[in-house]
């Protein structure tokens, strides 16, 4: 493994162990077993190294999310049961992969000060919306209308972000998949009543 790869691995570890803001150049170099000058040589700055490591870590998180979404695609499953099972898996994932999800939140905050990272995250969110809509509807991604991606995908993505923050903050009070489904049904009833 070359110095560049060592630095990326060290940056991912530091992001998960210390977070973005608390990671120093010395931390990165020490963890990688390279000189501090190697950071500038390979990445230009500590921030560029951390951004790249963060984006790679978030990209690797697709596998975590994908495993959490598997029940929704079970052939012959009752759609409501599959949706509740999907949420049970997501809530469990938020607790089991806490460092990944915290890094995700940090990336969101960091992106507000970094246009390049924000653009990368925006593209990732668009992919996420599309993938979520595909999984939830069972449709092929190429056949999904933009309206479905913007509604189903966007709302599911928003629900995931909010639920993630709740679970990370107070895991002992995390709702079950059945409770989330009941809450969505109640909100749907309220939205229908407001329409009349």
Image: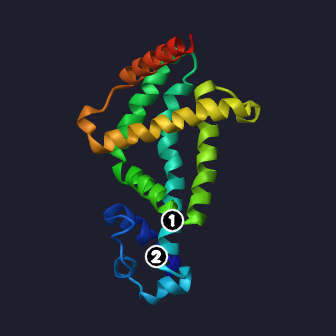
Residue at x 36%, y 64% (from the top left corner): 19
Give the residue at mark 2: 7
The number of numbered discs placed on residues in the rendered structure image is 2
Task: Compare residues 115 and 93 and report the one nearer the observer.
Answer: 115
State which mark lies toward you, 1 or 2.
Answer: 1
Query: What residue did someone put label 1 on?
Result: 113
Estimate the x, y position of residue 153 in percent, counting from the top left: 59, 34
Q: In the rendered view of the protein, which quadrant contains the C terminus?
A: top right
Callout 1 environment at 10 Å: few (<14), some (14 to 19), or many (20+)?
A: few
User: Image height check: is 45 above or below 64?
Assistant: below
Above or below, 172 relative to 60: above
Residue 137 appears in which quarter of the rendering?
A: top right
173 left or right of 15 in image: left
Res 10 seen here: yes
Dot 2, how many residues are within 10 Å of its Cα: few (below 14), some (14-19), or many (20+)? many
Does 9 appear above or below 119? below
**Where is residue 179 shown, x and y percent of the image?**
36, 21
Q: Residue furthest left?
A: 172
Residue 89, given in percent of the width and then of the height, sits at 41, 33
Which of marks 2 and 1 precedes in the sequence?
2
Left or right relative to 167: residue 153: right
Disc 1/disc 2 C-alpha distance (Å):
23 Å
Residue at coordinates 32% horizontally, 44% vertically from top-left? 168
Instruction: Give the residue at x 56% y 63%.
Output: 117
Numbered mark located on residue 24 in the image: none
Q: Which residue is depicted at the point 40% across and 17% down?
A: 182
Q: Can residue 2 be seen in this view?
A: no
Residue 167 in percent (x, y) is at: 32, 39
In this view of the protein, which residue sits in the foreground, 173 or 96? 173
Q: Is mark 1 on a helix, strand or loop?
A: loop
Looking at the image, what colour scheme do you see? rainbow
Q: Nearer the viewer, residue 120 or 91?
A: 120
């Amino acid at each position: 493994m070359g110095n560049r790869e060592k630095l990326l691995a060290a940056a991912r570890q530091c992001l998960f162990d210390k977070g973005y803001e608390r990671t120093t150049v010395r931390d990165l170099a020490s963890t990688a077993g390279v000189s501090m000058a190697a950071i500038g040589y390979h990445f230009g700055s500590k921030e560029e190294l951390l951004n790249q490591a963060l984006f790679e870590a978030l990209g690797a998180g697709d596998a975590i999310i994908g495993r959490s979404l598997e029940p929704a695609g079970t052939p012959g499953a009752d759609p409501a049961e599959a949706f509740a099972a999907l949420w049970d898996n997501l809530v469990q994932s938020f607790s089991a992969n806490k460092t990944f999800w915290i890094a995700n939140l940090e990336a969101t905050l960091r992106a507000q000060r970094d246009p390049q990272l924000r653009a990368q995250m925006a593209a990732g969110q668009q992919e996420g919306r599309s993938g979520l809509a595909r999984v939830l509807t069972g449709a092929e991604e190429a056949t999904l209308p933009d309206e479905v991606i913007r509604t189903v995908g966007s709302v599911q993505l928003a629900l995931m972000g909010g639920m993630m923050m709740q679970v990370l903050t107070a895991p002992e009070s995390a709702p079950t998949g059945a409770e989330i489904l009941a809450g969505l049904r109640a909100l749907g009833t309220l939205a229908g009543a407001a329409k009349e």
